[in-house]
Image: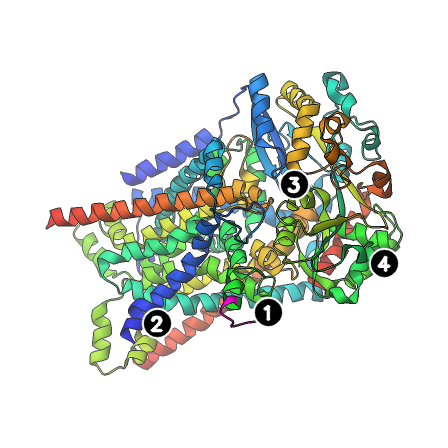
Amino acid sequence: MKIYFKSIIIFCLIYLGSFSAFAKSNVVNIYVWTAYLPTEVAKQFTKETGIRVNVSEYDSNETMYAKLKASSDIGYDIVFPSSYFLRRMRQQNMLHTLDKDKLPNFHYLNPALLNKDFDPKNDYSIPYLASITGIVVNSDSIAPNSVLKWQDLWRKDFKNSLLILDDMREVFSMALLTLGYSINDTDPKHIEEAYLKLKSLLPNTKIFNSDVEQNIYVDEDAVIGMGWNGDINLSQADNPKLKFIYPKEGFVISIDCLAITKKAPHLENAYKFINFLMRPDIAKKISLEIGYPSPNLGAIKLMSKELQENPLFNPNEEILKRGQIQNDVDEVLPLYERYWELLKIGS
Amino acid sequence: MKKFTKQIYPSFVYLFLYLPILIVIIFSFNDASRSLIWKGFTLKWYFELFHDSGMLTVAAHSIIIGILAASLASSIGTITAVSLFRYRFFGKNLLHGLLFVMIVTPEIVIGISLLLLYSATNVPLGFWSLLLAHTTLCIPFAAITVYSRITSLDKSIFEAARDLGASDFVIFSKIIVPLLLPAIVAAWLLSFTLSLDDVITSYFVSGPGFAILPLKVYAMVRLGIKPEINALCTLLLIGTLLLVVAAQVALKKNEKVGE
Amino acid sequence: MGELDSGVGGYFAGMKNNSSFKKICVTVVWSWLFIFAMVPVLLTLITSFLTADSSSLVVFKPTLQNYTQLFNSAYLKILLQSLYLATSCTLLCLIIGYPFAFTIARSKSRHRALLLLLVMIPFWTSSLIRTYAIMALIKAKGILNTVLLAIGLIHHPLPILYSYSAVLLGCVYDLLPFMILPLYGNIEKLNPDLLEAAQDLGAGKIRTMVKVVFPLTMPGIIAGTLLVFLPAMTMFYIPVLLGGAKNLLLGNLIENQFLSANNWPMGAAISMLITVFMGAMILLYWRNAQSKDKQNLQELV
């Protein structure tokens, strides 16, 4: 009897599973970087519009891309790809072309961060937050003035002490910058040079990490290395000794974008949500909570004077000019991958 | 010597197992959001947890999936072990091999291939996709645990039962299952643990509408372990311990009534 | 578990048996495993022979390249490192787990369930969180170092975190119950009279252990070893979190191929190779064990 019962249960499971459980209810499905959308903001949106916000999270562009590739009608409406991934997804026809008429708050955005190579007319993407990769030092152990450029990380006295971001593009960009090349370089010779340069950095490397880099700096398990401005900005509350340096050779600016997926099941709600996120008061809330610079000029105007002038939080034109915007490297990506793997194997 | 093996040694192992848990509990009261170093006492993470109703729902989802997946997996694992042990059937060796392959296959491979399977057959991602994936993930573990006990059962019992005219089903339910019970319980516990803890496969087979705890935890880790999650774990742990104590008390009462 | 049953399974297998119960069991097991295990495995196998493509991930162009590329010293190094870690982890788990499982299996029967449950409860807290707790314990300014510095045992913090020992510690901690449970299931059903009999016959404690208990609990040891060794081979976030991601292991390699490199065929090929390699090792072991069993039997006779 028990066994019949079991078979029935199993049959039911399979049967029910084949049903479509997607209720056409009033929701919007967001697929976002982990902890990259304040819960308050989602709640406020629901309160104002009655649209429920379902949030799923991913921890890297690659995982998001892999999941969307494996199952394109998965049901996500809005995704948050970084600039270099946006281009790839746009070219592979994975994104919906935006109708700007449905996004009246678009005019608040900083023109300095619009119409970049990865999406020349912003037909597919809306900048959400910008992040900058620089050098982090703990001023207790290392004088911040003694480290001004990426090249300083190769110094002999930093043996087995650096935190290097566990992010292929960021790490290669650093090496390419010290060699005087573009961060989006596609010349195989330059990439090999960068690989050899990075290989000579291995003795200085203590940790590869990009998940909890702020945690490691706060607890002083590493006192120097690479870091993202937003993370360090927030971490200063827990460890005021942390200093962020914009390296002399230049640095990576990555724009995390909002985009609508090709098969978004709740298109209208997606537009409403994106427009909501561009409202100055909301954009300000996001920037303050997540810690990264806002591309929304309206939001910056609402901030205190002190915050407006904080170069870590709101890098001015002059600083932004020194950076390079991250873009896709297309067909040489496998080459980067191969060198990255060799680097991680330690040979 | 006897005392050492009977009491001191197990206590050390328990200490080893519980030390990190103790730290989780302690840090749920830590007044720092981005640090694993003690900064001061606070209760604010508990307040935040109750403020955030989403977290509790997510925890409930996980427990439901865990219980269902563990029950399914230990049932199927048991009949798998019994079939492998007692019967000769088509593809028996293949089944052996398959169980082995499932354990050795990295979770990410299982996750992605199940996702491909789901999207090919239009199974929506959510509760069912997760339950099916978790059950599948646990079956080989359950089957091996049960099988390792079944191999040394005294086989003359089955023979005797058969001679007395017992059907296969009676032998299974009246003899095999009771004899295997400790192993089945162990298999259930293992499966439940696996399901509660699975991040990678879950990541690929979960959908927009149904969030579960391991993924939420994984997400929060990016912020450097929010103490809120420590608070949640502490509460779950206390809940579990209370249940265990209650079960023990109930058992004792039963025993007394029995006497 | 391929041939665990050699020797004993044949007993019933030989019987003609076509009851409806058998049919239902076999059908349920087979249909479930076929759909949710066999099909995915086959998908992986097929993928491993296809070509990666940057725009549509995989294109249907059969190739052997994914496999031939794997035969170079860099990958061999990763394989050896992973084997080393998995072996040391399994041995440690066995050494810690066996006496422990033995003690709880021999404790008073009404305590056993509780003791076993107590082993499992810590593992109902997410392993990521527990890994972070271990980090809090062993980090430079962590609990262990603070205590040791305070009582004056050391003068500089021990750099345990982000080292190989930290990875090993994490693996053992995470996989210990997978050793304890099957061992417990096996030791628990040992007949105590048997042990007494052995001792009555003049066998010392150690001799009883080696000659009687170990062989009788071998199925448990094998099951536990499999459940620890196999997952340990493809573990990936423990090396990242506790080891600082400096030494790639097989798990990291596969993860990289699937996610960062977006090279699914290569990832599938690595996964398949691991499966074949491990399968071969286990088969080899069983061949050995079987012939030894026969020898023992002959000696007895």
- On whether disc 1 and disc 3 are found on a single subunit, the reply is no
**Which region shows up in magenta?**
C150-154
Q: Residue at the spot x=38%, y=51% of the render?
A: C121
Residue C156 got which mark?
Answer: 1
Number of disc labels = 4
Residue C171 vs residue B220, the one in the foreground? B220
Cα separation, mark 4 vs mark 3, equals 30 Å
Which quadrant holds the N terminus of chain A? top left
Left or right, residue A298 beside residue B153 = right
Tell me the kind of residue under disc 2: Pro
Callout 4 touching callout 3 (CB < 8 Å): no
Q: Which of marks 2 and 1 is in front?
A: 1
What is the chain letter for disc 1? C
Residue at label 4?
Answer: A193
A236 vs A1, left or right, is right
Disc 4 or disc 1, which is closer to the eye? Answer: 1
Sequence-wise, the earlier of marks 4 and 3 is: 3
Distance of mark 2 from mark 1, alpha carbons? 47 Å
Report the residue at 69% width, 29% height from top: A284
> What kind of residue is marked 1?
His
The residue carrying mark 2 is C215
Q: Position of residue A139 (x, y in %)?
A: 72, 55
Q: Distance between the residues labelled 4 and 2?
A: 58 Å
What kind of element bears circle 4? helix
Q: Is residue A319 visible?
A: yes
| Snapshot quadrant of residue A311 | top right
Return the residue at label 3: A66
